[in-house]
Structures are given as C-alpha cells and as structure tokens.
C-alpha cells in the first residue's frame, strides 16, 4: 500500500485529499498542529477521522527535525504539503509569521526529503495569488508573477524553492498553482463561505446584515474536491513540473453574493456605488448586504482567471463542477448546519 503524508489535514484541502487517498487505498499520515483545542470537524464531517488507514500525526511545518522524523517514521513516498498560514488578509497583519510558515516552512520538508530519501515525491500548494497584479489574461504557467500580499510573496519563495530542489538535486518537486477553490468545508474567514453562511443565517432570520469589503474583486472559483484530484494526478505524472488548476471563468464577489441569494430563494437588488453600495432584499426592502471598508486590503488582487490547458493536456484534469452548483452546495450545507444549530 502506498504511504502518503498530507500536511494540514485539519484544513479544507487536507481533509478532501485525505479522503481521496484513502478511497484509493493509501495509508495516509495526516498532520495537525498542537493547539489547546484541535479541530477535526472537517475529517469528522467526511467520516474519515477514525479510518484505520489514517494516522494523525502532530507536526509543525516550521520544525526541521520533526520534518525529518515524519519522513523517517512514516516511510511515505508521496508528500502533499498543504499546510500554510493561508489567509491573505491576516498576512498583512502577520507578515513575518506568514513568511516563516508559508515561505520557509516548505523548505524544511524539501531539506528533509533531501536528507532522508530524495526519491520521495513532493507536492507544493502554490497559488494564483503569486500572479497578483494583472500581467496577462488568462494567467497560466508562464505568466510573470507580481504578488500583492505577504502571503503571495511567501508562496512565491516556496514555489521557486520547489523548482530549485527539482533542478539542483533531481527531487520530484511539483508545484500546483491553484486558483481559488471552495466547498462546504471552506473556512469562514474566506469570502465565499462567509457569504454562504451569512445568507443561510439571513434566510433563517438569525442575522440581519452581511458586511463585506471589495465587491468588485474578480476570482476564478472552483470546487475543492475537483482540485485535490488534480494534486494527486500531478504526483502520478512521469515528470515533476508546474501546473495551473483553474476553471477559466471569473466572477465578482458581488456576483457570488447574488448566486448565493438565488440558491437561498432571495432576490437581491444592488444600489449605490463603492463604499455606499448596498444589497437589498427585493421581497422585504431590507438592506441585507453592505460594504465595510475594514474588510478592504492594503493591496488588492483585482482579477484572477486561469488557463488550465496544460493540466488537461498532460494530466487529463478538468474541473467538473460549475460555480452555480458549487454555490448551491455551500448554501444548502450552511442552511442545514444553521437549522441544526451549529456552523463551523
Ligand atoms: P486552510 O487554511 O483550510 O488549511 C491550512 C492548513 O495548514 C490547516 O490544517 C492548518 O492547521 C495548517 N497549518 C497552518 N500553519 C501550520 C504550521 N505551522 N504547521 C503545520 N500545519 C500548519 O487552507 P486550504 O485547505 O484552503 O489550502 C491548502 C493549501 O493550499 C494552503 O497551503 C493554501 O495556501 C493553498 N492554496 C489554497 C487555495 C484555496 O483556494 N483554498 C488556492 C491556492 C493555494 P490549523 O488547523 O491548526 O490552523
Ligand atoms: P483570497 O480569498 O484572498 O483570494 O485567497 P478570500 O476569499 O479571502 O478573498 C477573495 C476576494 O474577496 C474580497 N473580499 C473579501 N474577502 C474576505 N475574506 N472577507 C470579506 O469580507 C471580503 N469582502 C471582499 C477580497 O478582498 C478578495 O479580493 C484565497 C486563499 O484560499 C488563499 O490561501 C489562496 O492562495 C487564494 O485564495 C488562491
């Protein structure tokens, strides 16, 4: 049985990737951080927390010696590095922590691979945030990078280090440049899940208003479950490489709110502009969405749209889920959770 390490199993992608690998018959070593109250709600919701082939291992990406021990003790031949301080907004407040975890952290794993077993295959979770300020539309593997946040800069360092270990030491280091991907397991700090959870609460009378920042930002949103399949395919390829995963469709944050409202049977009308913009429930006349500048970022990534043609040609990967299906799935999950009296 193939053994794989998934760092960041308590996160959205870690949970879905672990589920996929277990379905494929892998033994999975899923890493989590020691915290006062560890949160396994995602792997519990997927029903894999007690799977006999899932080993949960305490681990911190910033620690070289524990990276070495993780590889030695597991005997894994595939490492998926999904761990990161992944919230762009927080990276402006905590740039150094973000650099240590998101930028330098992956190098601990690359060094550990070099020391323990250079044949181990390594996946680095790179990001469309590295493209940042628009240099070309759509963005693809050879588009110049221009990151616009400490998070994007840190990820770019880890991306180039993955390529550098590939070229310097022949390590199978692959970098997946993934555009935004969402799901019912998305963290509530990210805009799509913040929207779907709030729309569910508004629908159920548990919340009055949803406050958002920049409604004009455009993102290429896909479904996380489709994207973890792409990660796995990247490590089964003949050669290590760099691949973009995206849907090639972009929509504004405002459009996502409209879709979420539609999925909850609410018709929304937009009034005003900029910081004065409001979303009004047509049936009741109540303001349900308003802009709060506190959610704006010091520097914004205005427009992301990716071209996944290389992933299709080399890996046979394609996104399967439309934005409408994804948004509906998220709203329905949040309606269900909020009706049951909880929402993570
Ligand atoms: P999440 O924020 O949901 O998960 C991040 C995971 O990293 C959590 O399990 C977190 O643990 C863990 N982690 C954070 N710091 C450390 C550390 N010092 N040591 C070990 N583990 C740590 O992210 P996603 O699942 O959404 O994303 C997965 C990866 O893909 C991330 O690297 C992200 O930057 C990248 N990415 C994500 C995209 C997306 O749209 N989702 C797009 C492109 C890239 P804890 O629960 O303890 O905080
Ligand atoms: P992003 O995702 O920064 O693209 O990073 P996020 O959902 O946080 O923001 C998307 C866009 O929405 C705008 N926005 C708001 N964002 C948040 N979080 N909260 C708000 O209230 C709000 N209002 C407007 C943002 O300004 C932004 O333009 C995600 C993360 O998963 C990264 O780890 C990953 O690398 C990238 O996607 C690809």
Image (tube, helix red, strand yellow):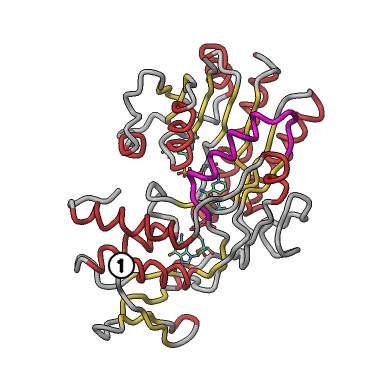
- Residue drawn at (67%, 14%), measured in percent from left and top? 117
234 left or right of 5 in image: right
290 left or right of 155 in image: left
- Residue drawn at (37%, 55%), measured in percent from left and top? 329
Quadrant in the picture for residue 276: bottom left
Judged from this view, the residue extending furthest toward the right is: 168
Disc 1 designates what residue?
264
Indicate the position of residue 48 as horizontal and vertical percent values: 35, 29
Q: Is residue 193 above or below residue 245?
A: below
Q: Is residue 301 magenta?
A: no
301 left or right of 144 in image: left
Span colored in magenta: 222-241
Indicate the position of residue 31 as horizontal and vertical percent values: 46, 27
Q: Is residue 235 above or below residue 93?
A: above
Q: Is residue 205 above or below residue 3?
A: below
Indicate the position of residue 197 as horizontal and vertical percent values: 32, 59
- Residue drawn at (43%, 36%), measured in percent from left and top? 15
Viewer-closest of 282 and 8: 282
Quadrant in the picture for residue 298: bottom right
* Label 1: element kind: loop
Q: Is residue 231 magenta?
A: yes
- Residue drawn at (49%, 26%), measured in percent from left and top? 24
Viewer-closest of 194 and 331: 331
Viewer-closest of 87 and 27: 27
Indicate the position of residue 304 as horizontal and vertical percent values: 63, 62
């Amino acid at each position: 049985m193939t053994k794989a390490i998934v760092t960041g199993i308590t996160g959205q992608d870690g949970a879905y990737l672990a589920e996929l690998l277990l379905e494929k018959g892998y033994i999975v070593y899923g890493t989590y951080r020691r915290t006062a109250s560890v949160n396994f709600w995602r792997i519990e919701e997927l029903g894999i927390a007690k799977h006999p082939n899932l080993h949960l291992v305490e681990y911190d990406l910033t620690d070289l010696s524990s990276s070495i021990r993780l590889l030695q003790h597991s005997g894994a031949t595939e490492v998926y590095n999904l761990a990161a301080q992944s919230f762009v907004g927080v990276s402006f407040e905590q740039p150094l922590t973000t650099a240590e975890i998101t930028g330098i952290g992956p190098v601990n794993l690359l060094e550990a691979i070099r020391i323990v077993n250079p044949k181990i295959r390594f996946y680095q979770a790179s990001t469309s945030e590295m493209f940042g300020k628009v240099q070309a539309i759509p963005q693809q593997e050879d588009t110049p990078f221009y990151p616009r946040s400490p998070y994007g800069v840190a990820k770019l360092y880890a991306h180039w280090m993955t390529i550098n270990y590939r070229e310097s030491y022949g390590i199978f280091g692959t970098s997946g440049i993934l555009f935004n991907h969402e799901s019912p397991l998305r963290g509530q700090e990210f805009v799509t899940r913040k929207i779907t959870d709030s729309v569910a609460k508004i629908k159920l009378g548990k919340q009055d208003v949803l406050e958002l920042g920049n409604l004009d930002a455009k993102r290429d949103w896909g479904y996380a479950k489709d994207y973890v399949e792409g990660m796995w395919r990247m490590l089964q390829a003949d050669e290590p490489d760099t691949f973009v995963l995206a849907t090639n469709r972009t929509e504004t944050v405002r459009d996502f709110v409209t879709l979420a409202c539609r999925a909850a049977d609410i018709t929304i009308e937009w009034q005003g502009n900029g910081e004065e913009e409001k979303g009004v429930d047509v049936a009741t006349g109540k303001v349900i969405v308003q802009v709060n500048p506190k959610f704006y970022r010091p520097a914004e990534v205005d427009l992301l749209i990716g071209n996944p043609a290389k992933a299709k040609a080399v890996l046979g990967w394609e996104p399967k889920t439309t934005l409408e299906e994804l948004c509906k799935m998220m709203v329905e999950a949040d309606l269900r959770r909020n009706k049951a009296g909880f929402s993570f």
